[in-house]
Every structure is written in structure tokens, then in C-alpha cells.
Image (tube, helix red, strand yellow):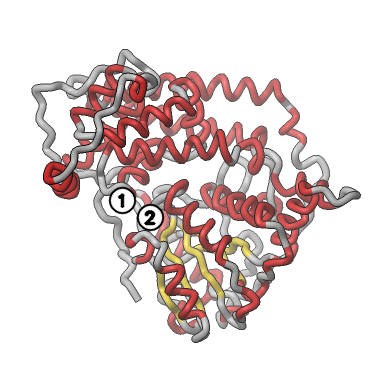
Amino acid sequence: MADIPEKSAAGYVGRLDASQQEKLHQFWRILMQSWNPTIAGADPTRKSSVSNPATKSHRRFFSLGRSQTQPTEEETAAVPTNLLSTLNSLGAEPNEIKTVNSLLKRLPGDKLRSTLVTAIKQDHPDALCLRFIRAEKWNVPKAWIKLVSALNWRVNEYKVDEEVLLKGEEYHLEKSRQSGDSTEKKDSEGFVHQLRTGKGHFHGADRWGRPICIIRVRMHNPSDQTQKGLNDYIIHCIETVRYLQIPPVETMAIVFDLTSFSLSNWEFPPVKFIIDSFQESYPESLGALIIYNAPWIFSGFWKIIHGILDPVVASKVHFVSGPSELKKLIPQGQILKELGGEEDWEYEFIEPKEKENDRLKDAITRESILAERKKLSDELFTLTADWISSSKSDRSSTRRDEVITKLRENYWKLDPYVRARNILDRTGVIKEGGSIDFYPTMASTSAQVEKSHVMTEHMHNAHVSAVVA
């Protein structure tokens, strides 16, 4: 089993070395140049202190063979002049510039900007950016492409905010109860099936404060739901877990419980969908993937899964047998009885409460909070432009941190007007205003003391370092 670091590594908010800070500045520059033509390029007299051996090797490879075709004027038409210049200075390959052009046609500057602000939610903007930068091994042009591709998927393809978060559990319950045999009804029935069975659900946190998702694979029958219904539920869960990540925690732990797993439970498409989602749309968001009590017949399936895993994701996989091994990752008092632990807790789906989503209809309040959010984001980007310039960096940094805090507070005011309530809201895990209680109904027991100690220790560490996988 691979080691999990108890302390954070470099490359996270508050833990950037000089070269990583420069990469973050470069990333913000090209991101803002995507919608603001007045953002100047980097100081040409200032040489980068960052080397990228992988990029250099990549260029040497192409120099020995046929070079890539340079983009035509049409293939750069959507790329602002300053952005194109900066991309070239950062060593972007011709095919990467063509991809930038293609993405900006689908997600033009102003829409890219607004989509980014929506996607940030309560997150730290730098933390969001750094996840994509780390995922691309500090290659800034590739990181831009990965982020904007994810934002394009979010707003133009999957429509996460309006189709998944805004509709939520109550919508699918209502659709599943309708008469007829429509595709939408079947999809919603599949979504509701996940809710009622608790096949995949959240409960508690591990030793590093990472929220835990438990997937009871034995309960999966491919014929019980449509693929879209299951995929919608998967994205619903990945989006929900973001609210459970208490800064500086940025990742989650997934326990794939393979107890009583059989051939009839195996289905590759949803597994691939989960992997693709984490690797492309939510990179650096998975802290640990715990394969629990895997039977011998799973070994063949694992070879298939391992073949499509990014090496970084693969390094976070832990094969665990029994609670004595699991307690190295999750304290004994937090391991559910069904997993062989001491926690006397069982999943139960609680129906939506009457009028719990009434605030979604309050357009006046929503627009007022959104106007405040736009004002804050405008200031954030102005301060960021100053922050990435050497002359105003220190002065802008303090105020920028203040604005980022205000953006987080603003989101939690906005949240009930843009996100339908879910079971974690109804059970008191997610509380009004964004506070999180992983164990809201615990009795006063020795197990509670251990849980309380773990979370108290985690929150203390949060002030001095970032918790990473």
C-alpha cells in the first residue's frame, strides 16, 4: 500500500516555491488574456526561472522529425493577440495553439470569464487553477487547455449548474413519479434508485479530513438504471463533495466496497465515466481510492481499469482487506459496522422536505447576490493583474486575499438560490452558511471522542499546511 503523506507537499496554496509561483502567475496571465485584451504579456526582460525537462525533450523529438504545421490565420482568429504572443513565449506547440483557438470559439472570452466565476463557487481561485496546473505537470499552456476544456464541458455539454445542481434530488423524484414511459422518466428513476439504495453515499472523513464516499458495488445491477441516470448521479456526487472539503482539503476518499462482489455487478462504462471525470473535469480531486475486500475474480477487471488510469491517479489506489488495514486510513471509530468497524450508522434516504427549494424561485434575491459576486470577481481580476506584475505584487496580494475570502462568503449566501437541497443538507452535514458537520447526530461515546480529535487535529493543521493526497 502506497504511503499517504501526513504533511502537504509543495505546489498548493500557501506552499508554492518561487518557480511554482511564477507558473501560477503565467497561468493567470493567459487565462485573463483570454477575455481581456488589455492584459499585457510578461516582461520580456524577465527570464523564467522555471525549466520544463519534459517540454524540452518533447521539442527535441519534433526537431528530429517532421515539424508540426504552423497554425494559419484562420486557426488563430479567436485567439487575442496578446494571448497568442504569450502562448508562443511559453513554448506552446502549434497544435496546442490550434486547440486554444477551437476552445475560444466554443467558449468566447466573456462566457469563459463568467463560467469560471460560476465554477469557482466557494473554492479558492488559485487552488482551482493549481489543480489543473499540477495535473499537467506545470506545463502552463496544457493546463489552460485542460481547464477551459473542463469549463466548456461544464457549461456547454453537461450543463452541470442548470441540469445537475439546480434540479437536484427533488426534481428527479418528481419526474420518476410521472406516468408514461419517457426517456426523462427512466433517467430520473435511475437517479432515484441510487438515492434510495445508498449504492453510493457520503459519510464521515478519513484521517486527513477528506470526505468519504462509500460505493457498495454488490448493489450494482446494470439493468437497474439508464446510463444517463447513473452518470447524472455520479456528477451530482462529485459536485456535492466539493462542499464537504474544508480548506485546505481539496480531495476526497472513495471506498469501493467489493464485499460479495460477483460478475453480475461488473459494468465498465460507469467505471470509465468516473475515471474520465476525475482525470479530465475534476483533476487532482481524488485523494485516495480504496479497493476494499476485493475477491480474486476482480483481478482481471483491475487490469482493464489500471490500463486507463493516469499514473498519478493510479498511485492513489490502495488495496485493503479488512478493518485492521482500513484503520490505517480511517480511524477505527469511523469505520462503519458493515465494513467491519465500530460505527453504528446505516444509510437511509430522507425525502425532500416541503418548500426546501423555495429559494430557487426567488430571482430577485438571487440576482442581487449575483451582482455582488460580479463586483467581487471584477475586483479579483483587477487585483490579480496587479499581483502578477512585479511592481504591485505585495500591495495587491493582501487585498486579493480579502476579496477571495469575500467571494467564498458570497457563494454561501448564493448557494440556496442556485443549488437544490440534498440529503446532506437535510441531515445537517451541510449547514446553512457552509459549515460542515461530518457526524451531526453522534451520541456521546468513545468513538465520538476519537472522531472529534481527528477533526480538531485536522482543523489545526489547516492553519499551517494544505492536506493533499
Disc sitting over residue 460 in the figure: 2
Q: Whole-percent x and y of residue 311?
A: 33, 62
Q: Whole-percent x and y of residue 295?
A: 52, 84
Q: In the rendered image of this protein, does residue 355 appear above or below residue 273?
A: above
Residue under pointer 1: 464
Residue at 59% in and 61% down: 202
Closest to the observer: 378 or 273?
273
Q: Whole-percent x and y of residue 439?
A: 59, 62
Question: Dot 1, crowdedness within 10 Å: few (<14), some or many (≥20)?
Answer: few
Q: In the rendered image of this protein, does residue 145 appear above or below residue 222?
A: above
In the rendered image, the residue lying farthest to the front is 66
Check if mark 1's residue and mark 2's residue have beta carbons within 8 Å.
yes
Amino acid bearing label 2: His
- Helix, strand or loop at label 1? It is loop
Closest to the observer: 14 or 254?
254
Point out the image quarter for the N terminus. bottom left
Closest to the observer: 194 or 98?
98
Question: Dot 2, crowdedness within 10 Å: few (<14), some or many (≥20)?
Answer: few
Amino acid bearing label 1: Val
The answer to which quarter of the image holds residue 400 is top left
Q: Is residue 130 visible?
A: yes
Q: Whole-percent x and y of residue 293?
A: 51, 81
Q: In the rendered image of this protein, does residue 4 appear above or below residue 373?
A: below
